[in-house]
Image (cartoon, helix red, strand yellow):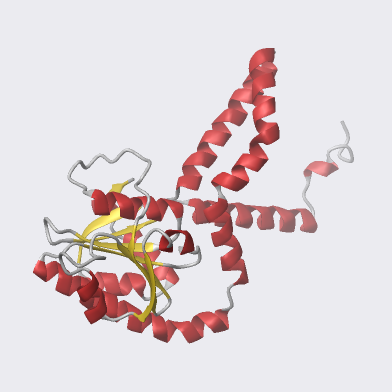
Amino acid sequence: MSFEQLRFLVPGPYDILEILIVAYVAYRLLMFLAGTRALQILVGITALFVIYFVALVLKLNMISTLLGVVFTYGAFAAIVVFQPELRHALARLGRSRLVGFLASSSKRVVADEIAEATGRLARNGTGAIIAVERDVSLDQFVESGTPMRATVSADLLATIFTPYSPLHDGAVLVRGDQIIGAGAVLPLTQFPVSDKSLGTRHRAALGLSEESDAVVIVVSEETSKISMALRGMLRRGITPDQVRTALAGPEEASLALTAARSDASPA
């Protein structure tokens, strides 16, 4: 076999460029999916592809035919299953750096107010759950509670969660510097939770963090501890200062949670 016949094995400049682009896209995709339910589903799909390939090699016609039908209609199912993640990805692609810069000051103010409110609620032993919207809309959950329009403030949050008030049992939904809903009912996590001490608020926080990219802050009525749920992970026993850091920007929340994987409870 001559060198000319093997020349196609030697990558050229454009081949190397394409390999680097594909590798970077694959890396960013895995980083985007890390810690979400989408990654677990992706692992399951990969396993089905492996089984399908093995069935073809071993000529297991029934299994390969059934999996072929599944893959034929799987694209439509994936659109439904990955709807929150797709919305998140498109929102990130369309997000402007200038808009993010102008909004950073407002985010700090909101972070300060929520941090002060959670600290106050924890000291008083008052249960609370606050969901801060990021890229994925929380409009569908507003309808389950009471829609409202009010500027975020520590005093208002403390008032909403006052025991025996009409809205204290549900979640407060925050968009930007506005409270858009209170008394909202959130979906409970669909994954097994190893810690049986977690109450309904914590399970709801995990459930919403699995369905969206929201940062969910929980104050336990039983222990007076503050917890934070993000991307299907729950970190317990955080301080108001850590809440402030987590809400300061879109990336800080991920870093704040990732930095404490050792004391985080998986969904």
| Image position, residue 47 (x, y; %) | 55, 30
Among the 4 quarters of the image, the one containing residue 235: bottom left
Left or right: where does residue 262 sit relative to residue 211?
left
Instruction: In the rendered view, tell whether residue 265 sits above or below residue 14.
Output: above
The x and y percentages for residue 9 are 78, 42
Q: Residue at x 77, y 50 (%)?
A: 11
Residue 57 appears at what percent x and percent y? 68, 17
Q: Residue furthest front?
A: 166
Residue at 34% x, 51% y: name it.
206
Eyeballing the image, is 180 above or below 61? Answer: below
Quarter residue 249 falls in: bottom left
Work out whether residue 264 can be spotted. Answer: no
Q: In the rendered image, which quarter contains the C terminus? A: top left
Identify the residue at image location x=79%, y=57%. Answer: 14
Comparing 114 with 146, the one in front is: 146
Q: Relative to residue 53, is residue 25 depicted above or below? A: below
- Do we see residue 42 in this rendering? yes
Image quadrant holding the N terminus, namely top right
Decide if residue 151 is on the left or right side of residue 196.
right
In the picture, measured across the screen, residue 187 lies left or right of residue 157, that is right
Q: Nearer the viewer, residue 89 or 160?
A: 160
Nearer to the camera, 176 or 226: 176
Residue 34 at x, y = what percent? Answer: 46, 51
Nearest the viewer among 208 and 160 is 160
